Image (cartoon, grey):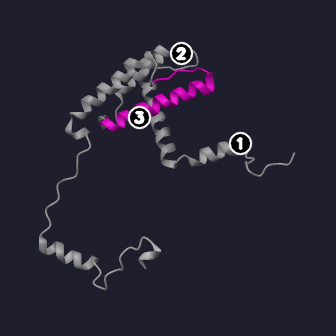
Amino acid sequence: MAESKRFGVASNLEIDTIIKGSIPHNTDRNRNSVWNQFQQFCAERGHLILNDTPVQVIAAVLKDWAVNMRKSNGEEYTERSVKTMWNVTANIIQEKYFHEYNRKFNPFTDIEFKEARDAKNAKRRRLKIMPTKVKQPPPPQAPVSPTLYFAAAHIYIPLGPTPRPFVSSVSQL
């Protein structure tokens, strides 16, 4: 039987390298930063998450993290940052337990994590009503005067011959 040239011959190691190389550097840095902050949080709060830690305890730690995460200077994060950081942390924990301990759970859907998700959502709702923690729309622009508008238009509109109209078929030539 002749060998097909249609399909590639990449090994699993090459595929893993391709996948790792496709992750943007900032995404990787962000995940590491969030994970380091979560580990510091756990150390300060006395949370210990091990192989045999029950899912209910992991959920309680994520609930505590959702409400009590802060910047290094003690300020609250923005609403979007709380959502992102909680989701990244939950995702890393889920991956860690699957790959290292062969334990499956889903912090985004499992009932054991409902209170943790509710705590995250309550924190986000509270931050949404704080004007300093919500992304503000840009300030309104002053209207452009007609004189300035037409002066700018002359700069960008070519004054040469008008372009030929679009021709949609050869018969129109």
Q: Which residue bears the numbered disc 1?
A: 13
Magenta-drawn segment: 79-107
158 is higher (above) or lower (below) than 95: below
User: Nearer the observer, disc 1 or disc 2?
Assistant: 1
Quote the CA–CA distance across marks 3 and 2.
Answer: 22 Å
Q: Earlier in the sequence, mark 1 or mark 2?
A: 1
Q: Which residue bears the numbered disc 2?
A: 53
Quarter of the image where the C terminus is located = bottom left
**Secondary structure mainly formed by the magenta segment:** helix
User: Callout 2: few (<14), some (14-19), or many (20+) C-alpha neighbours within 10 Å?
Assistant: few
Q: How many numbered discs? A: 3
Instruction: Give me the disc on residue 85.
Output: 3
Residue 35 placement, left or right of 13: left
Q: Position of residue 43 (x, y in %)?
A: 46, 25
Residue 60, quarter of the rendered image: top left
Q: Amino acid at mark 3?
A: Met
Quote the CA–CA distance across marks 1 and 2.
Answer: 32 Å
Quote the CA–CA distance across marks 1 and 3.
Answer: 30 Å
Residue at 77% x, 52% y is 5
Q: Earlier in the sequence, mark 1 or mark 3?
A: 1
